[in-house]
Amino acid sequence: MLEAEHVGFGASGRNGGWCSALFPASLETLAGLSTRDDALAQHAQMRATIAEVARVCAAEGIDAQLARGGTITLARSRAQWARAEAEVAHARSWGRGEDDVRLLGRAEADAVLTATGTLGATYTPDCAALHPVRLVHGLARAVEARGVVIHEHTRVTAIDPGVAGCAHATVRADHVVVATEGYTPALPGRRRSVVPVYSLIIATEPLPESAWESIGLRRRETFTDHRHLIIYGQRTADDRLVFGGRGAPYHFGSRVRPEFDRDERVFASLHATLLDLFPHLRGTRVTHAWGGPLAIPRDWMASVDLDRRTGLARAGGYVGDGVSTTNLAGRTLADLILGRSSDLTRLPWVGHRSRRWEPEPFRWLGINAGLRAMALADREEAITGRPSRIARLAAPLLG
Ligand SMILES: Cc1cc2nc3c(=O)[nH]c(=O)nc-3n(C[C@H](O)[C@H](O)[C@H](O)COP(=O)(O)OP(=O)(O)OC[C@H]3O[C@@H](n4cnc5c(N)ncnc54)[C@H](O)[C@@H]3O)c2cc1C
């Protein structure tokens, strides 16, 4: 395993710790690539992957501080409530029952998570909150114990069939798997395969029990709301609130730089959103803030692929849903490379190729216009309560 920096340097070591059944492409998109049953099979495998990650942690003695509390998605305006109802109606139309996703009325939602302006929520049991660095370090130990050698500070600069070229060495292998996610555009020939979009996070100091009595999250449910520009939070095992979101700009030419991990304007906006949800946290210290790039394919369709002819394989394009999906990708690639035909190798994301992103400056214009539009749509909905048309108009720019 060749790693340019160190284990956990990438998104896997800095994410929001949602191990969920979320998949970036819709069931309709998956069915369009294959069949309705195959789309549902992909969803079922995503759900099962949460249990698989928990099983691996238990079996390998990885203390990832995993808690399977599910996810609560609040509706905090009439427009958000309309989306919550539509999401559940859509799930039912696919035969997904109450055990998968359900509506919560206001009192039920408050009993899980008490935030301002809640009208109701959707709830799914399919998520575990975890500590990402503990997971990734534990996995590294587990594979090293099986004989895998991890070469840190070893940047791959060229990839060809059977060969990964580094500055001071050439590594030969029957199969070469590219799993560089948000960093992929820096590799030769892959500049437009995905775009790196930044997600940023803040973490509070550990909160006292009195604060948790009013907030809730007793089972460490992960939380968000039905706004357009994604936010995500979790109660950590040491009682902090970790709270992240999109909103940082896309950087021209798909650049990824250490300085982009921090954006004081976005950190301030995340803090303001946190206080909007929980005003009684005013005065609570934010002790940590960080960020990193995730990868978005042009059609928002994560995929895994093995070219049997060349031995070149790849996995990625998870958008912000890679904690569980990387596990499914790993198991799927193992089956593909070992030539095993399995339920996993028949899933619709296998072998899918997303089209390339537009060249600059169209990429920069489109993605940043889309991000702006989502933020504007949320502001408009907060004022009018009605579903924003801006979001619908901007959807083709992003999705
Ligand atoms: C701030 C943030 C919050 C997120 N929150 C969540 C969440 O709560 N839930 C969720 O499911 N997903 C979340 N995601 C997405 C998720 O973390 C990623 O989808 C997932 O971790 C991707 O894993 P990966 O192993 O494919 O890529 P990464 O973890 O990004 O690893 C790629 C590795 O490749 C290395 N590399 C890059 N180029 C080279 C090269 N040329 N040679 C050698 N090595 C190279 C990098 O150093 C890096 O370590 C979040 C992402 C971010 C950035």
Image (cartoon, rainbow, N blue to C red):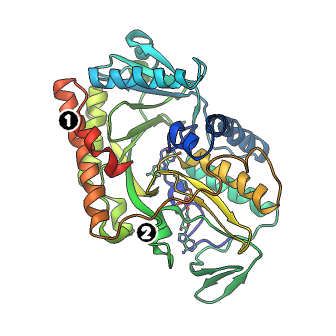
Front-lying residue, 139 or 386:
386
The secondary structure type at the circle numbered 2 is: loop
Q: Is residue 190 left or right of residue 68?
A: left
Q: Can residue 210 be seen in this view?
A: no
Instruction: Point out the tag, 2 or 1, that comes first from the N-terminus.
Output: 2
Query: Which residue carries the number 1 mark?
Result: 379
Front-lying residue, 148 or 49:
49
**Disc 2 from disc 1: Cα separation:** 32 Å
Q: In this view, does 239 lie to the left or right of 291?
A: right
Q: In this view, does 387 lie to the left or right of 173?
A: left
Q: In this view, does 72 lie above or below 142?
A: above
Kindly identify the residue that appears in the image at 69 percent across and 55 percent down: 330
Ligand 1 has an atom within 8 Å of the beta carbon of the residue at disc 1: no
Kindly identify the residue that appears in the image at 34 percent across and 71 percent down: 253
Percent from the top left, x then y, of residue 342? 79, 47
Percent from the top left, x then y, of residue 331? 73, 52
Label 1 is placed on what type of residue?
Arg
Query: Which residue carries the number 2 mark?
Result: 192
